[in-house]
Amino acid sequence: MLAVLVLFTIRAWPNALDTELDVTCYKLTIAPIIDQGYISGTVLIDFQINKNANSVVFNAGNLVIDKVVGEHVSGYRKMGADLIIDLSQREKTKNEIVIEYHGNPKKGLLFDNKNGDAYTVYATSQWMVCNDSPEDKALFELDLTIPSDKSCVASGELVQMIPENGKMHYSYQQNYESPAYTYGFAIGNYNKAKEDAKGVQLNYLGRNYSSDQLKTIFKETPAMISFFEEKSGVKYDQSAYTQVLVGNHYQEMSGYSILKDGYGNLVLKDVTETNLISHELAHQWWGNRITCKNWKHFWLNEAMATFMSAAYNEHRFGKEKYQADIGSYYNVYKEIKKRRNDKPLVFDDWSNPSQDDRNIVYFKGAYVLHLLRGEMGDENFWRAIKFYSSEYFGKSVKTVDFQRALEASSGIQLEDFFNKWIY
């Protein structure tokens, strides 16, 4: 689990900027130039905002804004990472704007010139103008142009491929709403393997592994999907799920996940080292679709996925493996307490989290869910998890929603437990 500790401590998220803003759809056209680390893009944003608001704020990282047009756009300016767009008087809350931009991202979209790879990770606003707030879920359409000798994977369903002058134009559509941090793509020269899991096409990609090795690394995936469907009460509702071994990062996106290239070797050496595969897959339920309303409640995303990876290990490899996972989570928490850095799972502020803060939401959070299971008993706990997951699938949640769902489904009052361990 020491490797896991390093891998799970690299993420930091911005705060929501405008709670009145509700993006309904992003339509992005983007053309990365890998050897130059350069992108140019155009994003059409459909959104609603109070008709009395005289401006709207989007997150734009270090991108250079070339043009902003729209019926009610009266001006715009970039202030730090914020793109502030002035709005004229209007009668409707619905708006549509088009933003043209370019840039050389230093994070969010990573370029590997040596291997000819490019992949997105963590910070969507570094490569696409968007609203970073996790509760603002929207549809996503992507037109991606890449060299024809490379392949790609992206959020959404692949609906079209058009060759033109040594390039390939890919079009993807995501037909359900999700937060902007779940949007992304990966481009490269990959070996591939695929299989069918009850109608879901599973794709496994990686440059440094053969097709047979990829199948071995990800062979638990069909069973994991079945396990999470049973525990959540919600079917995996996309036609495909793709896992890509590339680079040095881990992140869940809508319909696919990035996993560190070297991680595959760990699984080939020990078939039970599947925590990261199950963790990222679990986010297709807890995180991507049942999403923390703001980053103060980030533990609802990460603790749940971390705990569910241990729960799958218990289901697949036995109680001893589960106890080893929970023990490692507790040891991380114990060291945090020793350093006097313990905090509630619901944070007052998540604008500049420390490594201990991140470990709290992952590992203290997963340990607390284990304690909650013991408090409620297995039957009540898993029935409550299913009720919560079914009730809030596709929605944004705060910790109080989680608590009330558990209490409503079990009849057990959990105020004392939540006050002690969570608040």
Image: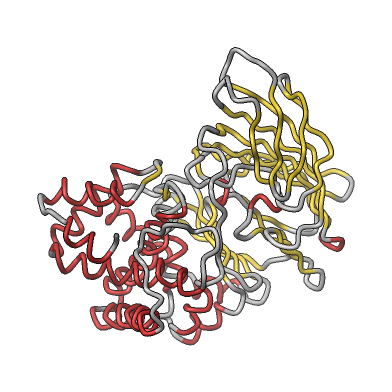
From the viewer's perspective, tell me whether residue 245 is left or right of residue 236.
right
Q: Is residue 120 above or below residue 178?
A: below
Q: Where is residue 377 in the image (x, y as percent from the top left)?
A: 13, 64
Q: Where is residue 111 in the image (x, y as percent from the top left)?
A: 76, 64
Question: Outermost residue, right direction?
Answer: 165
Q: Is residue 7 above or below residue 129?
A: below
Residue 336 vs residue 129, the one in the foreground: 336
Question: Outermost residue, bottom direction?
Answer: 269
At 41% from the left edge and 68% from the top edge, which residue is drawn? 362
From the viewer's perspective, tell me whether residue 175 is left or right of residue 98.
left
At 57% from the left edge and 45% from the top edge, which residue is drawn? 156
**Occupied quadrant, residue 79:** top right
At 27% from the left edge and 48% from the top edge, which residue is drawn? 388
Residue 242: in sight, yes or no? no
Residue 85 vs residue 369, the one in the foreground: 85
Q: Is residue 204 above or below residue 233?
A: below
